[in-house]
Amino acid sequence: MEDIESMYYLETNRTFNLVRKYAWIFTLTVAVGGLWYPKLGLSVLPIIAGLFLTSFLKGRYWCGNICPHGSLFDAVLLKFSKNRKIPQFFKSKFLRITFFLFFSFQIGRRLVNVINIYGQGPFLDKLGFIFVASYLMVTVFGGITSVFYSPRTWCQFCPMGSLQHVSYKAGKAIGVNKSTDAKLTIESTELCPECGMCARVCPMQLDPYLEWNESGQLDNEKCIRCNTCVENCPAGILEIKNN
């Protein structure tokens, strides 16, 4: 089975913008450097705000183009990954919701403890370390799953990804992202050779060629708009655009 998987899922190079290529440096700086300088964890707060706002307008665009951990998985760990099929358990809604609730509880509990020392000397260090510990946990656990399964295994149940799903749904519900929500789009479904290349190179292991809606777009909310399938489509009929 593993031989078949390694033949199906291709370790193609990702499509990198400058941020996506080097953002992994930020991940290691916070996760490792924060053990000695906990205030580095405070730099994660703008990250959370950024992904929340971006997803409100553009779905999981942040994951595929800006996310520091995504950069680590794609730019560094892809080279060491077995690039196997992601187990269905990691993709399950049950795990995504359970892990989100667990993660939220842990962060909330620690924040309550830190608020009790607000105004005291160690406050900022203690507050920063909450995010340092979280970044380190994602780096270690996400790194392990990247190597043994696929680089974007963690992204299947990432709490921040779940937060983006909620933010994106809110944006759709009130219609604010109608003009900003660029999706994977096919020029014409009749031109698709159904070779499956878009599925073979997709970091999230989606099957775009089987999921086009009536407008020729991919509505799957797990799509991270990374352009990898666009660049690898042999027919050259894919693009990320607003319909």
Image (cartoon, grey):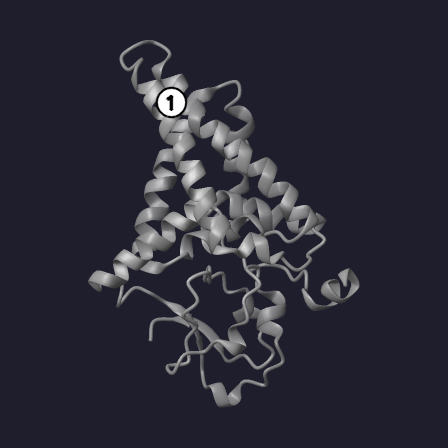
Query: Which residue, given by chain and number where applicable, does mark 1 sit on?
Result: 127
Query: At x 41% / y 79%, what residue is drawn?
Result: 213
Q: Label 1's element?
A: helix
Q: Which amino acid does label 1 sit on?
A: Leu
Please provide percent x and percent y for residue 83. 68, 56
* Count of numbered badges drawn on the protein: 1
- Judge left or right: residue 235 versus residue 225: right
Extreme residue toward the right, this view: 3
Q: Does the rendering let one see residue 110?
A: yes
Say which quadrant the N terminus sits in: bottom right
Please provide percent x and percent y for residue 222. 46, 60
Say which quadrant the C terminus sits in: bottom left
Q: Residues within 10 Å of mark 1 (few under 14, many from 20)?
A: many
Please provide percent x and percent y for residue 127. 38, 22
Query: At x 70% / y 68%, what residue is drawn?
Result: 8
Q: Does the rendering let one see residue 176?
A: no
Please provide percent x and percent y for residue 7. 74, 67
Q: In this view, does 134 lie above or below 190?
A: above
Extreme residue toward the top, this view: 121
Answer with the quarter of the image where residue 199 lies.
bottom right
